[in-house]
Amino acid sequence: MISINDISFEYPITDEKTRTVLKNISLEIKAGESITVMGPNGSGKTTFARCLNGLLVPSKGKVVVDGLPTDEPTNLTEIRRRVGMVFQNPDNQIVSATVEREIAFGLENLGKPYDEMHRIVDEELEKFNLQQYRKKAPHYLSGGEKQKLAMAAVLAMRPSYLILDEPTSLLDPQSRKDILQLVRQFHSAENDHSHITTIFITQFAEEALSADRLIIFYDGRIFMDGAPEKVFSNIKPLLEIGLEPPVKILMQNLVKRT
Ligand SMILES: Nc1ncnc2c1ncn2[C@@H]1O[C@H](COP(=O)(O)OP(=O)(O)OP(=O)(O)O)[C@@H](O)[C@H]1O
Ligand SMILES: [Mg+2]
């Protein structure tokens, strides 16, 4: 479980001025949940995500990952292993000269024995259908393939939580579908990633429907939190903050009214 206890976050603007972008947020993320996070630009989603694995430490309040507080520097290595992060732009994440080395990179850092490392790299290549590129340099891959590689490298570490910060926003519709399907598969499949907890940040309402829970951010606060269909049924307040519910929900609502 990740518990978020009344956290606020301030970015320094000048020596004496700060800007508060997260305001008194409390949440519990239970093991095995699949959560989507949405919210207008600048509402604090990325800042929140970075607080979950200790990349940022809240100015006030506490984040505790499986009993480990993120404000304790000695916990950070273990927290980062448990909480994997995939970002919007895979180019900012990929560091190795070949596809297979990228997947092995984190495992080497963990000191995994060679045989086990080899097995995991093979498994991840297969899962993401990247086998034919294993010896290739990552910059030869398409955007969607690079995003798959970034995910494979994170999942190779066998995290308990997977945070994806708009992983589909730079992709075409087909690659977007592929990535979403893979994320849902990790969450539900009986494999090594079985029931991994996923926190998926997206601007595409359709992508939220398949999650257990949808959290809407607005102006650094939690605006709504609940089952996706229920949250989306609040059409008017969502439209007022600039979020459009999925077409399916809008249609259902139209039918109900007529
Ligand atoms: N390093 C920083 N220094 C100062 N302000 C920052 C910094 N990073 C982000 N901010 C501000 O904090 C606010 C929240 O940013 P954040 O990136 O968390 O929002 P977001 O919901 O992820 O937005 P987007 O949908 O555009 O990705 C924004 O107003 C942003 O300008
Ligand atoms: Mg963001």
Image (cartoon, grey):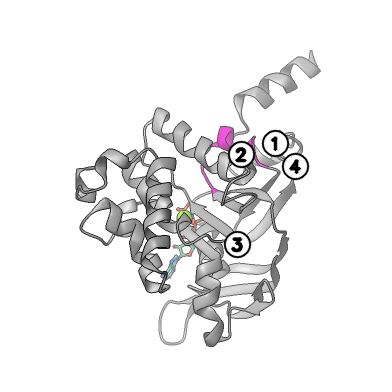
Amino acid at the residue labelled 3: Gly
Label 2, on which residue? Answer: 208
Q: Quadrant of residue 29?
A: bottom right
Amino acid at the residue labelled 1: Phe
From the viewer's perspective, is the residue at label 1 or at label 3 nearer? 1
Label 4, on which residue? Answer: 227
Task: Of the two numbered discs 2 and 1 on the same chain, state the one appearing first in sequence.
Answer: 2
Q: Is residue 17 above or below residue 258?
A: below
Question: Could you tell me if residue 240 is visible in this image?
Answer: yes
Q: Secondary structure at mark 3?
A: loop
> What stretch of residues is rendered in magenta?
201-211
Label 4 – label 1 distance at C-alpha: 9 Å
Task: Of the two numbered discs 4 and 1 on the same chain, state the one appearing first in sequence.
Answer: 4
Q: Around disc 1, counting alpha carbons within 10 Å, would you say few (fewer than 14), some (14 to 19), or many (20 or more)?
A: many
Labels 2 & 1 near each other (Cβ < 8 A): yes
Labels 4 & 1 near each other (Cβ < 8 A): no
Label 4 – label 3 distance at C-alpha: 21 Å
Task: Of the two numbered discs 2 and 3 on the same chain, state the one appearing first in sequence.
Answer: 2
Label 1, on which residue? Answer: 232
Amino acid at the residue labelled 2: Ala
Amino acid at the residue labelled 4: Ala
Q: Around disc 2, counting alpha carbons within 10 Å, would you say few (fewer than 14), some (14 to 19), or many (20 or more)?
A: many
Q: Secondary structure at mark 1?
A: helix
Label 3, on which residue? Answer: 220
Q: Around disc 4, counting alpha carbons within 10 Å, would you say few (fewer than 14), some (14 to 19), or many (20 or more)?
A: some
From the viewer's perspective, is the residue at label 2 or at label 3 nearer? 2
